[in-house]
Amino acid sequence: MLTNREFARRFKQIRMQSGASQIETAKAIYRNENHIKNIESGSDIYQQWEIFFKIVWFFLMLLPRLF
């Protein structure tokens, strides 16, 4: 299991590698940019499965950009 800090670091790394901005990521999961900033700082690790799956789906859709 990842710690909040590890998750935050990995989340930001994947987002940046994909070329997605914080705003794009926020819009894709129906949240505001501050929510993404909070996740990336490790201060707001979401606890709702719905949001988790939206984030996972968003990054899976971006995978072709990484290759």
Image: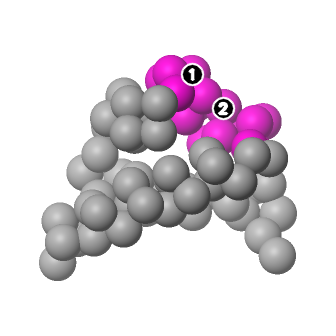
Q: Nearer the viewer, residue 30 or 62?
A: 30
How packed is label 2: few (under 14 Cα within 10 Å), some, or many (20 or more)? some
Would you say 10 lies left or right of 65 here?
right
Q: Which residue is mark 2?
A: 38
Q: Label 2 sits on what residue type?
A: Asn
Label annotation for residue 48: none
The magenta span reads 31-46
Secondary structure at numbered mark 2: helix
Would you say 2 lies left or right of 34 here?
right
Q: Residue at x 29, y 63 (%)?
A: 61
Is disc 1 in contact with disc 2, using a CB cutoff of under 8 Å? yes
Residue 14: x percent and y percent? Answer: 43, 61
Q: Label 1 sits on what residue type?
A: Asn
The quadrant in which the N terminus is found is bottom right
Tell me, yes or no, if residue 17 can be seen here: no
Q: Which residue is mark 1?
A: 34
Q: CA distance from mark 1 to mark 2?
A: 6 Å
Tell me, yes or no, if residue 57 can be seen here: yes
- Within the image, what quadrant is residue 40 found in? top right
Secondary structure at numbered mark 1: helix
